[in-house]
Image (cartoon, helix red, strand yellow):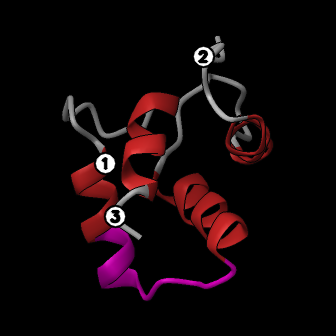
Amino acid sequence: MIEADAPEGTRAVFGEFDTDDDWLLNVHEFGGAVRRLTGRALDDDALRHLFRRADVDGDGLVSLPEFEGSLKEL
């Protein structure tokens, strides 16, 4: 389920890169979404670091609220 208060652009990009439609991003999906929103690709180390920081609950996946929080670090 998509959070109703998420900015429309962020919500749309999140949904576009959530390729398995579970409303969670794995590291690969997360990297594509970050690249789309920022216009830059992160190297593997930077991507994994940002993903670990974004995954607040430690489940190995990033939810929409976690994703939005991670964008503030960029």
Task: Identify which residue, 44 or 9, lies in the foreground.
Answer: 9
Graded by Cα atoms within 10 Å as few (under 14), some (14 to 19) or many (20 or more), the crowding at tag 3 reads: few
- Residue located at (22% from left, 54% from top): 53
Label 2 sits on a secondary structure element that is loop
Segment colored magenta? 39-48
Q: In which quarter of the image is residue 48?
A: bottom left
Graded by Cα atoms within 10 Å as few (under 14), some (14 to 19) or many (20 or more), the crowding at tag 2 reads: few
Label 1 sits on a secondary structure element that is helix
- Residue located at (44% from left, 30% from top): 65
Q: Which dot, 1 or 3, sits closer to the camera?
A: 3
Task: Identify which residue, 62 or 73, lies in the foreground.
Answer: 73
* Disc sitting over residue 3 in the figure: 2
Q: Name the residue under label 3.
A: 73
Q: Which of marks 1 and 3 is nearer the N terminus?
A: 1
- Residue located at (77% from left, 35% from top): 8
The amino acid type, in three-letter code, at marker 3 is Glu
Q: In which quarter of the image is residue 5?
A: top right
- Residue located at (39% from left, 82% from top): 44
Q: Name the residue under label 1.
A: 54
Q: In the picture provided, is 54 more to the left or to the right than 67?
A: left
